[in-house]
Amino acid sequence: MTNILLITADDMDGNTPGSFGGPNDATPNLDRLAAEGMIFRRGHVPAAVCQPSRSALMTGLWPHRNGAEGFEPINEGIGVINDLLKAQGYLTGILGKVKHLQPVERFGWDTAVDMAELGMGRNPEAYKRGTAEFLERAAAEGRPWFLMANAHDPHRPFHGSEVERERWTEEQRALYPAPSKVFTADEVKVPGFLPDLPDVRTEYAEYLSSARRCDDVVGAVLGALERSGTAQDTLVVFLSDNGMAFPFAKANCYLRSTLTPLIVRWPGVTTAGSEDAESFVNMLDLFPTFCEAAGAEVPEGLDGSSLAPLLRSQNEEGRDRVFTVFHETSAKNRYEMRCVQDARYGYIWNAWADGETNYKAENMLGLTWNAMLEASASDAAVKARSDFYLTRSPEELYDLTVDADCLHNLAESPEFSDILADKRSTLAQWMTETGDPLLSAFSAKA
């Protein structure tokens, strides 16, 4: 049976690794993994916020089907991947983000090491030690294993930020090292969905530094795997749970909200240095993929399908679009959103957008949002962008081939009325098939 190593980043943008178009020196360990395996350029998470994204991955079900729409436990009776793996004799372990899969006892981890024991989830040496100890136990017991190693970077507070100094004591900050490379504001290029303002540039550099330390954690975990002698018997998967914690990314349904840098290395299955740039995949697809790797029967009723054919570079129908959702922020504010994206268009329905309700989420903490508000006093374009972020429109439509940053909403343009109608119909069909509780509201409003 194949061992399974699932490595996750916390709030890493889908385009941050160098192998996905990011700075060449941002993520050397991830780029090495990508060169040894296969990357997916159209990989998406189901929901762009931590706990719902992770719960969906581990249950193979949409948030509205497993119960974890926000920061709450999955419903009683919902199966998790650990159930199937443990039945196959697997040893299961988790490093970091333990409490972001609830109820913790439902997952039945054989080994669980949380943030405080991992240098606030930011110490590569602690992850290396935790991985090595887990693999030593698996070897001693003669068991296949599943390890979920969750870096807490590049989640806020970012490296070197004022928020980091304010939130954590000097003793807490001493528990983890600086990244192996620290970026400065004058060497970074701000993503196109954000205005290029001095404080935005500063904060994006802080984010990239934190992303580099996440990469340091990845290198430490992979190094422990190599030293264990089991790398050739191990399926390795890397992804981020959602986009970066900036406006128009995390906790939304934009392209950069849910796009994830998915890397898979499966000895004997994937071809080194390969990529799939066309197929849309959802992280719900990992549950049945792990079942296949473990020789376990795939349960009926899952919302994903195995990636194995794509990993073998085979074509597969039904990969021409992806659906994503959003329900609730970590502060328990509800902003219901639904999205369908294909190779050209992205359509978003904002159920909450009534012209009066203002959006508020954790991605507005720190320097960037305040810089946007300050610039709005003298820059009409930034003001329009900021105002739109607060209230949105009930419907958004973007031509992603020319506007991947989702800057120009086409939903009210008459020449796109047929496209809009088609996307409404496609989304309504998906909502029907998955039992989305907002189907009636969408049908009445759209």
Image (spheres, grey):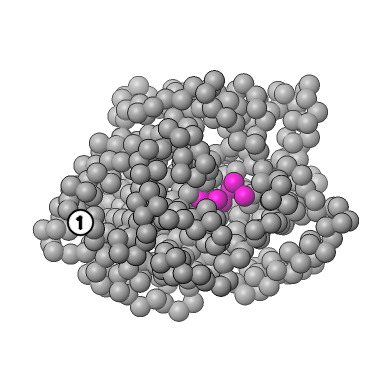
Above/below status of 58 relative to 211: below
Q: Position of residue 361 (x, y in %)?
A: 61, 41
Q: Residue furthest left?
A: 140
Q: Provide the residue span drawn in magenta.
A: 255-260
Q: From the viewer's perspective, tell me whether residue 305 is left or right of residue 420.
A: left
Q: Residue furthest right?
A: 414
Is the N terminus in the top left, top right, bottom left or bottom right quadrant? bottom left
Magenta stretch containing residue 259, yes or no?
yes
Q: Residue 54, how many percent across, how many down?
A: 45, 55
Asked if one can make out residue 279 in the rendered structure from this viewpoint, the answer is yes
| Relative depth, front residue between 95 and 308 | 308
Q: Horizontally, is 182 left or right of 136 in the view?
A: right
**How many labels were placed on the picture?**
1
Tell me the element at label 1: loop
The residue labelled by disc 1 is: 230
Residue 259: percent from left, percent from top = 55, 50
Magenta-drawn stretch, dominant element (helix, strand or loop): helix
How would you rate the neighbour count of disc 1 (Cα within 10 Å): few for under 14, some for 14-19, many for 20 or more? Answer: some
Whole-percent x and y of residue 140? 11, 58
Quadrant where the C terminus is found in the figure = bottom right
Among the 4 quarters of the image, the one containing residue 288:
bottom left
The answer to whether residue 79 is magenta is no
Q: Residue at the spot x=27%, y=41% of the render?
A: 220
